[in-house]
Amino acid sequence: MDESEDVPKDFIKLKSEKLSVDEVSELVVSPYCGAVSVFIGTTRNNFEGKKVIHLEYEAYTSMAESEIKKICRDVRQKWPSIKHIAVHHRLGVVPITEASVIIAVSSPHRAESLEAVMYCINTLKASVPIWKKEIYEDEYSWKENKECFWANSEK
Amino acid sequence: QVSVLYFARSAELAGLRCETLRVPRQVTSLQLWEEIVRVHPRLAVIRDQVVFAVRQEYVLLGDQLLVLQPGDEVAIIPPISGG
């Protein structure tokens, strides 16, 4: 058994095509890991009584990728047993119920990957320069994550 | 001369996504904001909700002194909503 062949890797992708849970989870599978934890962020069809037609995402791509890399680095410091990390985020139009983000993490035992996945999505929402526009029937709205420290919390 | 990038609501208000601006080499982040608003007055409404990203590091609008090099990227960052 030579675990040095299975070097820990980060898989980060921003893409406009439909995301695949199979693809993202397969990226992190490892024979040395007994756990793969996956988070899928999907689009809801309503907000405050308004019907959401679809979402549109845009990103400061180069900085988004480097911020996600920082999150991966932090994850590996906090949970050193983590093997692979994959973060795929969709850009452009995302129809209702489709995934806008998929995060998968593998570790030898389940506690670390479960905690790391939660940390990844929470930190992504606080620090990665990606913006979501909700399109309603008559209007649209740029959303603001409550985790974003420079958003006004009361509007 | 720096590259200024606009995203989300700031791109809608400024009417563009990217431009080069001539700015002083040393400037506080607040002064930089004021230079940009001079060019795009409609941005004034989001002053309390944005931060900058200078060379891809977040910078609050305030007294922080920035030392800018030609070609540096400065981005206007409205409240984010990824994930």
Image: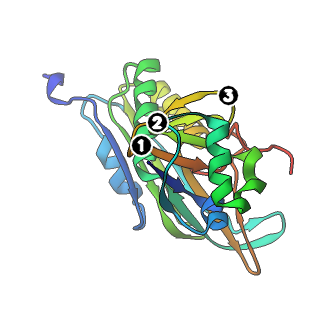
| Crowding near the residue tagged with mark 3, few <14, some 14–19, many ≥20 C-alpha atoms within 10 Å | few
Q: Position of residue B81 (x, y in %)?
A: 63, 51
Q: Which mark is residue B68?
A: 2
**Amino acid type at image mark 3:** Asp
A102 to the left or right of B6: left
B68 to the left or right of A42: left
A4 to the left or right of A34: left
Q: Position of residue A135 (x, y in %)?
A: 67, 72
- Disc 1 versus disc 3: distance between alpha carbons? 19 Å
Q: Earlier in the sequence, mark 3 or mark 2?
A: 3
Residue at 59% x, 56% y is A131
Q: Chain of mark 1?
A: B
Question: Could one spot residue B83 in this view of the protein?
Answer: no
Q: Chain of mark 3?
A: B
Q: Label 2's element? A: loop
Q: Label 1's element? A: loop
Q: Chain of mark 2?
A: B
Q: Looking at the image, do the residues carrying marks 3 and 2 touch, with CB atoms under 8 Å apart?
A: no
Residue at 36% x, 55% y is A22
Q: Nearer the viewer, residue A35 or B2?
A: B2
**Amino acid type at image mark 2:** Leu
- Disc 3 versus disc 2: distance between alpha carbons? 15 Å
Q: Looking at the image, do the residues carrying marks 1 and 2 touch, with CB atoms under 8 Å apart?
A: yes
Q: Earlier in the sequence, mark 1 or mark 3?
A: 3
Please say if A81 is above or below B60. above
- Disc 1 versus disc 2: distance between alpha carbons? 7 Å
Q: Position of residue A53 (x, y in %)?
A: 66, 76
Image quarter hosting the N terminus of chain A: top left
Q: What residue is shown with label 1?
A: B72
Question: Could one spot residue B43 in this view of the protein?
Answer: yes
Q: Label 3's element? A: loop
Q: What residue is shown with label 3?
A: B63
